[in-house]
Amino acid sequence: MLWTALYALVGCLTVSVPALAGGSLEARYTLTFTGMPIGQGAFVVEVNDEGYAASGSAMVAGLLQLVHPAKGSAAARGHFLNGKLAPISYSGNSENKERNEEIRLGGAGGTIREVTIAPERPYRDDRIPLRDEHRVGVVDPMSAAIIPVGGTGELTGPEACNRTLSVFDGAERYDLVFYFERTETAKEVRGYSGPLAVCRVEYRPIAGHRAGRKSTKELSENKNIFVWLAPIAGTRVLVPQRVSFGSKIGVFVVHATHFRTEVKTAAPATR
């Protein structure tokens, strides 16, 4: 659940996207727990007026890899439809000691129409049922990392954060509610030293989750989830530069060490 939550801590479906020249991002991340490096990841995005494509990967690293090997990757592409994100496809896979899982989603017009999960998850009688309505007006976890900001105002002000994100990952439907906290200047990031929007995030399960599961309850009550958002050059789109996830046992932090953006004028990424 942690990797899914971190992938999906950012994203938006209901914000208008103005015309933009287009841009790309290549970023590398480290994952730490109470200051100790335990993982690493990468994120690549290309976006312009009509479409976007994004991919990411993450894996446990260091000594932890010997006792809890885990890795995952995801990719998505979609259009901007009437000023909104409209995912077309999503694929994700995760591997650990207990389970290897593949998820594929297909969508059109803001609705997820095709879902494949292999192997199928076991039936649990305390799982809140998913219905067709839970696939409408949503984004997949990777598309959720593309955050358009409407208008012509400041990119990293309150408009970057004050929103509710509707996410469907194939098995669960949940909301991520963002609240603006402040604006900061990026530090210790090679390739970017500009402003960041800092958002506090609340997780609200809607369907597909196990109602009595302790981890779900703890996540929904967690008031210590924050995300720092940075712009892609040449666009009015933000992506996560840092995520901090507080827990009872310590603090997980995903932090970009390299962050390279570039203005693009190429054809739409979805073609």
Image (tube, grey):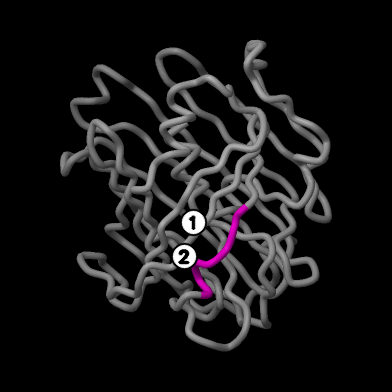
Rate crowding at label 2 as few (under 14), some (14 to 19) or many (20 or more) other CA atoms within 10 Å: some
- Residue at the location (50% across, 21% down)? 213
Q: Which residue is mark 2?
A: 25
Dot 2 or dot 1, earlier in sequence = 2
Q: Secondary structure at mark 2?
A: strand
52 to 36, vertically: above or below: below
Query: Which dot marks residue 16?
Result: none
Q: Residue furthest bottom?
A: 152
Q: Nearer the viewer, residue 59 or 264?
A: 59
Q: Amino acid at mark 1?
A: Val
Mark 1: few/some/many CA within 10 Å (<14, 14-19, 20+): some
Kind of element beneath mark 1: strand
Task: Check the image and report above or below for 13 versus 268.
Answer: above
Is 225 on the left-hand or right-hand side of 83?
A: left
Image quadrant where residue 163 sits:
bottom right
- Which residue occupies 26% across, 65% down? 189
Reading the image, the residue beneath label 1 is 44
Q: How far apart in space, not on screen, are marks 2 and 1 (Cα)? A: 6 Å
| Residue 185 horizontal/vertical position (percent) | 28, 75
Q: Is residue 30 left or right of residue 270?
A: left
How far across and how far down the image is residue 112, in percent? 78, 43
| Quadrant assignment for the C terminus | bottom right
| Residue 154: percent from left, percent from top | 48, 84
Disc 2 residue type (three-letter): Leu
Asked if the residue under mark 1 is in contact with the one under mark 2, i.e. CB atoms within 8 Å, the reply is yes
Residue 70 position by quadrant: top left
Residue 38 among magenta residues? no
Q: Residue drawn 53% across and 75% down?
A: 159
- Magenta part of the protein: which range? 159-165
Give percent across and percent down for residue 174: 61, 41
In the rendered image, the vertical position of residue 136 relative to residue 147, given as above or below: above
Of residue 24 and residue 161, the one placed in the foreground of this image is 161
